[in-house]
Structures are given as C-alpha cells and as structure tokens.
Amino acid sequence: MEVKADIGLIGLAVMGQNLVLNMNDHGYSVAVYNRTTSRVDEFLKGPAEGRKNIYGVYSIEELVDKLARPRKIMLMVKAGEVVDKLIDSLIHHLDKGDLIIDGGNSHFLDTTRRTKELDKEGILFIGTGVSGGEEGARHGPSLMPGGNPGAWPLVKDIFQAISARAPDGAPCCEWMGEDGAGHYIKMVHNGIEYGDMQLICEAYQLMKTGLGMSPDEMSRIFKEWDKGELNSFLIEITGNILSFKDEDGSPLVEKILDTAGQKGTGKWTGISALDMGSPVTLIVEAVFARCLSALKEERVKASRILKGPDSQFKGNPKSFTEDIRKALFASKLISYAQGFMLLREAGKEYGWNLDFGSIASVWRGGCIIRSSFLGKIKEAFDRNPYLQNLLLDDYFKGIIAEYQLSWRKVVGTSIELGVSVPAFSSALSFYDGYRSDRLPASLLQAQRDYFGAHTYERVDRPRGQFFHTNWTGRGGEVSSGTYNV
Ligand code: 6PG
C-alpha cells in the first residue's frame, strides 16, 4: 500500500521550507508542493536532501492523493488573493472533514470569511500566526492558530511538537479562538513588535545624539540591558547589530538608509484600534514614525531650514543611560498594556473567548517579541485572569511607580534636546491620561455642544441623560442625535 504523508505544505519559500524541515525533524511525513514546480526539486535536492518522509509532488491532485485522511494542507504563501485562489483550487479535491491551514500574515477578517465559507463546504479551516522568521520556522516558531475549533485536535500534536518552548517547557502554541482570532493575535503581536522596535530605536537615538555614544559603546549597553529585566530577542539582536562591521571595518548600521519599510500588520493593528475605539497610542506612533522616516528627501531638505536646540546632553551620561533604560522599560509596559486592552476589546467585538495568559504564554518563546517580560505578563493573568489592565497588577504598578521619575526626565530631556521620541512620550501621556479621573473632555463636550448641539452628560446627573445648552442665546433648543462611533 502506498505510504501517505501526515501533512501537506504548499509554498516552498523560506518559511515553508523551514517548517517542512522542522515537522520532519519531529517525525512527521510531509508532502510538499510549489506552484513553480522546479522549486520542489530544488528543495528535495537541497535543504531536504537525504531526508526520509519528505515527498515532492507536482500538482494539487497529486498532493491531495498523497495525504492521509483527514487531509491536512498548510499554505505558506503570500497573504491576500493567492490564498483564496489556492483554496478555490483545493476545495474540489478535498473531502468533508479535511483541513486547510493558512500560515501567512493574512488579515483576520479574511480568515473569518474563509473559516465560514469553508465550513459551509464541510472543510475545516485554520488561520495561524507563525512568528519567528526563518530561524523560528526551522527550530521552533510561536504559533497562534485560530479558526474552526473542530480543526484543532487534528493539528495540535504537530503544531505543539514543532513550536518553540517557553522557559518552563510549555509549547509556544495554543488554540487562540474561533474564526480570525489567531491571525488577529498575530497582528497585535506584530503591532507590539513595531512598538518594541521603535522604543529601542528611540533609546539608540538618545544615546547616539544626546550622549554622543559610538555604536560599539551602545552595543555594550544593549548587551548589558539584555542581562536584566529588558532581556528579549529584540534587545539581543540590537546589541549584535550595533557591533556589526561593514567590509571596511566601520559600523554597518551607520551606512543603512534611515527609511523604514513596513508590510502592513502594524498599520492593521492601528486601524483595528481606531475601529474599536481602543487607545493604542504607542503602536500607532510607531507606525507613523516609520511613515515619517520614509520621507527622507523631504526631511533632508527640512533639516537645512528648520532649526532646533543644541542636542548634546550636558548632565551625567551614566545616570542618564540608566534613566533611558528605565524609560524604555516603563514605555514597553504601557505598550503591552495597550496591546492587551485592544485584545480585550476585540474579544468582545468578535465574540472570541480570549485567554490572555495563554496569549502571553505563547509569545514567551519563538516569536520576535519573545522576552522575559512576557513571563511576568503571564504571571499577572495567572494571578487574575479578569485583570482589567496590566497597569493595575502589583508588579507592573510597582515598576511604573519606581521608574516614572526617570521616564519623565528622559521625555523632558528629549524635548529639550530636540530628539524625536514619539513612543516614549506618547506612552507617558497615555499613562498620565489613564490615571486621570478627570480629563479635559468636559471642555471638549462643551465645544461640541456649542457649535453643533451634540449634547453632553453631566457629573451631577445619571449617565445616559443628555443635555443641550443654548450657549449663545442665538441657537435653537433642538439638539442633534447622541450616537458614538
Ligand atoms: C514575525 C514577524 C513577521 C513580519 C516581519 C515584517 O513575527 O516573524 O512579525 O511576521 O512579517 O517582521 O514586518 P514588517 O515588514 O511590517 O516590519
């Protein structure tokens, strides 16, 4: 009898190839297919050479035929139309109860749509976040599967076997929730990734411009920070990047053009936050910082025209470096608090029963934002699964209380020195806004009512009663409707 493969994978680009090798390392047989079929042979003769139980196939029909039932087919292709086209070409060959898995960075609403459409055909669907880049895919990514819950038992063992392990040995893969929940959580992961990267870049800019440190000096600082509470993959690679030399022996980072690219997941997080009315300020600032960086020619021109203060820091560089570390950690905390606020709103909006401790847990290893800090977040949700906001947890509250003077000093000094720190400063503004029992929105409501009769609620009346004042004596008594987007 012909041997069947445990799982099929379509898309032999770098992530797909490495996932296949990872699955194979864990004893799974994999049938591999790529639209440009020469890639199948290149893979079999290259990275997969000498391996048993990796089968190259050259058509969808052959792939479907090669798989054990219920069939499991993972797509590792570019997000968007390609996924829909592949699903269309697969579905006629599949039987009820078979499973399609999308491992790309798909938009969560596409995943929700696909889950529902395929469910009607009796086909199971999973949209899974896969984080960790090439290295992660090969040796253990963080996986965030969501979709049709009936699909999870079919891949739980494979997924948990190939995923990274957290420091306590737990697999960095758990079921995230229905429909687009997995891809939503991956999207927020990426948004947080944008925030973490921007915060690190602001710390770098302050040390470079304000303190005049060389890349080697900064590399040493980041490597030192990596040994403490900031310990994370992104701090670690930053330390390595800063000491990396170009062929001529000079720091490569200095030669890299300062215009950031982006593939869209940070922007999607910001759009979702706006849709949900969730104040995820830091991630949005991080996206805009990339947009501002992209205006290179305009900035170069403006730099010759628009003047700012002397950007050299005059105080004690050692203690200021420690202030920067504390500002970075406190801001990072705000970013994660905001990210989890967004997840909470999304859970309500889309009817997902999200387990925040579990989300923090699967981010502890394998993914780009992996860090010791995520262990602390998991512990906070273990202590209280209904925690309204991370900032209210004793550990986080304590850190902010201890670090906020340094944080305020860093933001204040950056403003004095003319160094742009949108993430540090928006995090601090958020903190001060969040801890305010009274905000100037009272005045804002008055303005809305003054010019547009939009009405307001009063502190001395029950919520839900709306009032309009004829502020000028000229307007009428008629108010406009009171709806909120
Ligand atoms: C990951 C990453 C990855 C992401 C890239 C590029 O978790 O492995 O988040 O999925 O696509 O980092 O993102 P940008 O091009 O938007 O920076």
Image (cartoon, rainbow, N blue to C red):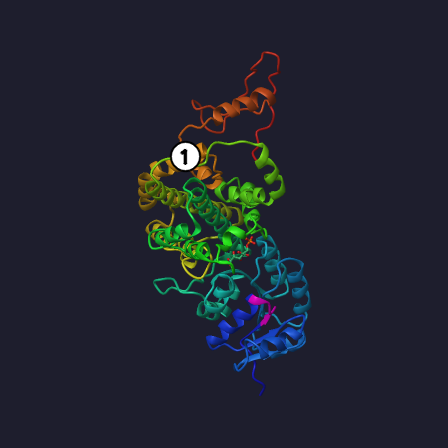
Find out whether residue 13 is within the magenta segment: yes
From the top left corner, tell me how far across and down residue 466 is, in percent.
52, 25
Instruction: Name the image quarter holding the N terminus.
Output: bottom right
Q: Which of 142 and 469 is in front in this view?
A: 142
**Residue found 41% across the figure and 46% down from its top:** 213
Find out whether residue 140 is within the magenta segment: no
**Residue found 54% across the figure and 77% down from its top:** 48
From the top left corner, tell me how far across and down residue 355 is, in percent.
43, 54
Up the image or down, 269 lies above or below 16; here it is above
Residue type at mark 1 is Thr
Q: Nearer the viewer, residue 84 or 45?
A: 45
Q: Horizontal placement of 58 versus 288: left or right?
A: right
**Could you classify mark 1 by the number of other residues whose Cα lies within 10 Å: few (under 14), some (14-19), or many (20 or more)?**
some
Magenta span: 9-14
Instruction: Name the image quarter holding the C terminus.
Output: top right
Q: How many marks?
A: 1
Q: Horizontal placement of 87 versus 404: left or right?
A: right
Q: Which residue lies furthest to the bottom in this view?
A: 1
SS at badge 1: helix
Up the image or down, 147 lies above or below 67; here it is above
Residue located beneath label 1 in the image? 413
